[in-house]
Amino acid sequence: MNDPSKNIQDAICRLASAVDSLLVNGVLICVTQWDIAKSFIQDLVQKAKSSLQEVGEASGSSAGWMGDAERPLDRLGSTLLALTDFRNIPQEEVVSLSVQLTQQYRAFTGAIKKLEAVHKVAEPFYDSRPADSARRIEELWNHLSGILLDERADKKRRATAS
């Protein structure tokens, strides 16, 4: 028997995992400064948007909810794209973008939690994921601007040492 609640739960799990992948891998590629960083982030955003569409189809979600989830998702992508240039933008902007990324992620997770509550999802994604996973994401938020600024300072030190 096809359980609509389970279909919604599975679609939300894929979406939330895609967004966590966007976040973690997007930050990693920002730090590594590979030439493919921008296209890689854009690809991750598109994958997350495809997962968002799946959630919309599985849940019959309203345009309002879809917008509540899609806006922060778009902003996450835009902010990560801006952070690919973290070595060349003012320090204050790096800090501001890091804070914005955190706010956008929280807005996105809030939209997911609302949808799970509306559909009475048996195992909400963010409540059921391993504590270690949640802790690592939180640590990333707490240290993101420091990580980027330290990496920028290290590159400048290496450049002046050579």
Image (cartoon, grey):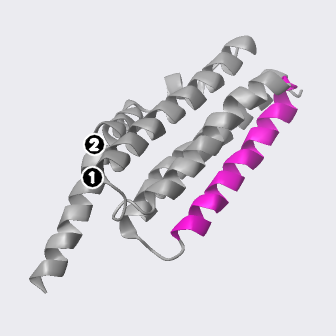
Among the 4 quarters of the image, the one containing residue 17? top right
Identified at 45% across, 51% down, the residue is 24
- Against 124, residue 79 (above or below) is below
Q: Can you give x and y, in whole percent of width and height, for residue 157 in the image?
A: 14, 72
Q: Amino acid at mark 2?
A: His
Q: Is residue 5 magenta?
A: no
Among the 4 quarters of the image, the one containing residue 137? top left
User: Going by the image, does 77 lie left or right of 141?
Assistant: right
Identified at 65% across, 52% down, the residue is 45
- Against 111, residue 74 (above or below) is below
Per the rendered image, the range of residues in magenta is 37-62
Q: Can you give x and y, in whole percent of width and height, for residue 39 in the image?
A: 61, 68
Q: Is residue 42 magenta?
A: yes
- The secondary structure type at the circle numbered 2 is helix
Do labels 2 and 1 touch, CB within 8 Å? Answer: yes
Residue beneath label 1, please? 147
Q: Residues within 10 Å of mark 2 (few under 14, many from 20)?
A: few
Name the quadrant of the N terminus. top right
Judged from this view, the residue extending furthest toward the bottom is 162
* Number of numbered discs visible in the structure rendering: 2
Identified at 10% across, 81% down, the residue is 161
Residue beneath label 2, please? 143
Give the CA separation, mark 2 to mark 1.
6 Å
Residue 63 seen from this side: yes
Q: Amino acid at mark 1?
A: Ile
Question: Which secondary structure type mostly characterizes the magenta part of the structure?
Answer: helix
